[in-house]
Amino acid sequence: MKKISDKVLPSVLAVLMSAAILLSGCERYGERITAEVIDHTGCKSLKSGSVDGTTPDTLSCINYVFEASSGTLQITHINAGFNCCPGKLTCHAEVAGDTLFIKENEQSAACSCNCLFDVNLTVRGLESREYIIQILEPYCGKQERLTAHVNLAETPAGSFCATRKLYPWGIMR
């Protein structure tokens, strides 16, 4: 059996202790998050306007309902901006500290236009607690973020919006 050098052992111990300190200092929650797009409308047009009949196309809005018993958050994203020919719409969710990030994606940008969709998605594995919910939209650019501080234990249903002034928002006026 090979003997560990007296010079190597202190270095190895220092690395292991540093790793233990770093890992124990990170705030982690026990959530295992999954997210999926359930369905969505087709591309809204000047003729179709707002599918829900009440939300102007200058707003990007989230309506949510949380089911504490299953840890499931049902979300409808009204006026989500995507390419006119997005292929399959998907989403990914993760929790970092107190923030729930939900990133929306499209499979392709096959057309030379963008439009608005209403997208229903589900996030599973959440705890009944406070979150900053942040929706990461592919065509939002530097516009106002679609973000809200919500306490799912106290307010399991609600909505929040962000104003949109750039294409594809605001063209149905």
Image: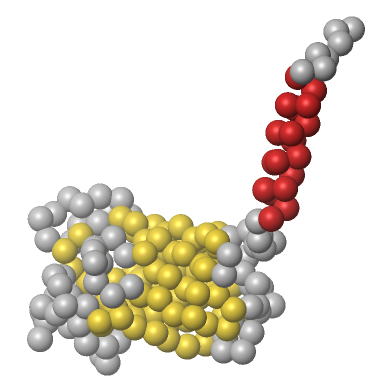
Residue 148 drawn at (x, y percent) = 44, 80
* Foreground of the two, 76 or 168: 168
Relative to 26, say whether 166 is above or below: below
With 107 as the anchor, is 72 left or right in this view? right
Residue 152 drawn at (x, y percent) = 59, 82
* Foreground of the two, 164 or 15: 15
Residue 139 drawn at (x, y percent) = 24, 63
* Foreground of the two, 19 or 7: 7
User: Could one spot residue 124 in this view of the protein?
Assistant: no
Kindly identify the residue that appears in the image at 22 percent across and 87 percent down.
Answer: 56
Residue 149 drawn at (x, y percent) = 49, 81
Relative to 114, say whether 110 is above or below: above
Kindly identify the residue that appears in the image at 17 percent across and 50 percent down.
Answer: 110
Relative to 63, say whether 102 is above or below: above
Q: Quadrant of residue 49?
A: bottom left
Q: Quadrant of residue 69?
A: bottom right
Residue at the top extreme of this rendering: 1
